[in-house]
Image (spheres, rainbow, N blue to C red):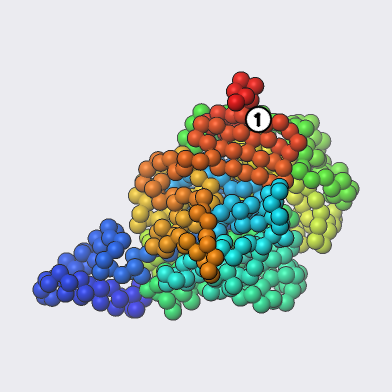
Amino acid sequence: MRSVRHRRHQSTLVRQLQLRLRLPLRLHQDFWGAVFTLMLLFSSTGVVAADSIRPNVLLIMADDLGYSDLGCYGGEIATPNLDSLAAGGLRFTQFYNTARCWPTRAALLTGYYAQQVRRDVLPGVKNSGGGNRGTRPVWAPLVPQLLKSTGYHCYHSGKWHLDGKQLEGGFDHSYHLADQGRFFSPNSHFRDDVKLPAVERDTGFYGTTAIADHCVEVLTEHFRDYGDQPFFHYLAFTAPHFPLHALPEDIAKYSQRYQVGWDQIRSERYARQREIGLLPGVELSADERDLGPPYDFPDAFTKLGPGEVKHPLPWNELNAEQQQFQATKMSLHAAMIDRMDQEIGRVLTLLRERDAIENTLILFLSDNGASAEIMVRADGHDPTASPGSAASYLCLGPGWSTSSNTPFRRHKTWVHEGGISTPLIAHWPARIKNAGEFRRTVGHVIDIVPTILEIAGAAVPTEFEGVAVPVPPGRSLVPAFTEEVELRDKPLWWLHEGNRAFRTAKWKLVAAEGEPWELYAADDRAEQHNLADRHPK
């Protein structure tokens, strides 16, 4: 139900419209209701004030989610809420992140490549930083800082992994879950930039739920206090990033599902992708059985025991103990994604109850591909503890990561398609009318900020705090909400830990660190036919 304030605002706008058009005030109220509705749908300027038509924005990011992990992208994991957004909106099939969490988040919230804003290393550039070391230039504000001047209220819930603090970055309220190693008992988390006490184990806390709790709380307050004004909410889950910590009731749903092995799951996902028309003509990439985790932690295998394996071997080559251990890990990964979808459902319910879903742009994506990493951190791993509990520390590993990234090659940190391809769901009933369609338009996380600025009516600044602002490289996705479009005339590019790539409309040039360039036709998304020798130029 709309707030009383919103209804009064609407009535005032109708009266202003009557006066400007010099029409009788006695015309039937329903007529003016229809006029107001049409103005909302078709006008972006004039008497209808911006506050009444600018959409809310809910930007949702998952952590280490693979391209095929969602049901609507071919997966078997139950994601009904995200599937419903896809059915009522668009699924982008060629959308890209940066292959790693912190550079993706920098690009996502600034609209620049991470290297441009010193959030990933660029050889030869002084003070270019990776991880938490790089500090953004003054001219690189976050998108909330640009939205605030246009009347948006801005909120953040979840992971950060950026330099600076949230309120300093333009957010009105924030819950920052900084501890990535403990879903049940974080040592480091913040509310409105103030550190909170550490959470004890066995107190009912679970990170994914806590992040959604904060989102629901601040949006409830927003609807109560600012119901006639738009919001931007950045909802950044830490799931399904390792450690694989999940709730018992969610684990139980998948306890027997993955005994068939990663080869079978990958084949099933690819078959579903072909059936729904997600990636027509794209092959299933060949197994890279000698490619293990991107980082070597040999002590982890000692801690994890004989059930852990370093390479994505054929399932039938694993012994019974290894098969059980690996199947259990994937059940945890699935449970974490299932729970994330459930929590997203709570947020969607709130939007529907407040009659806000129609004019809210919801974007969902992942910060990188699924992870092949295997390590033990934080509180360590107790092999006698129940898998998925606070005392355990498990990672997905290359076998299941290969399945999660179906049909692509490689994993998080690599800039082959498996590392950089993400689902992107766009849902906005007021503007996106081609419900359920795929979009083949090539996009990148640098395109999110210009998209938000366009629909919010906010200008791209030429200077910020007295410093000139370079022209951002991103392009608004708004034209793609209506039809297939080509957004750019310059290549997209990637560089992370020596892994590098360029992508144009026709070609993909890619190389892993220390390896020669490979060249693929752009429609060879599985990167199976290296044309470098045939087209050396």
- Residue at point 15%, 69% (across, down): 21
The residue labelled by disc 1 is: 518
> Is 359 positioned to the left or the right of 170 in the image?
left
* Residue 173 position in % (x across, y down): 56, 74
x then y, percent, for residue 258: 68, 42
- Amino acid on which the number 1 mark rests in the picture: Glu
**What residue is drawn where x is 52% and y is 60%?**
469
Locate residue 35: give its quadrant: bottom left
Residue 499 can be seen in this image: yes
Name the element at disc 1.
strand
Which of the two residues, 183 or 315, is positioned nearer the viewer here? 183
Vertical side of 15 occupied by 281: above or below: above
* Vertical comparison of 297 with 379: above or below: above
Query: Who's the residue at 66% across and 73% down the image?
Result: 190
| Relative image position of residue 234 (x, y in whole percent) | 54, 63
Pick the residue in front: 123 or 154: 123
Point out the image quarter for the C terminus: top right
Identity of the residue drawn at 69% across and 76% down: 196
User: In the rendered view, does 314 fall on the left or right side of 239?
Assistant: right
**Residue 345, visible in the rendered structure:** no
Check disc 1: other Cα within 10 Å, few if <14, some if 14-19, many if 20+.
Answer: some
Please provide percent x and percent y for residue 465: 53, 70
Quadrant assignment, res 55: bottom left
Q: Nearer the viewer, residue 66 or 116?
A: 116
Figure quadrant of the N terminus: bottom left
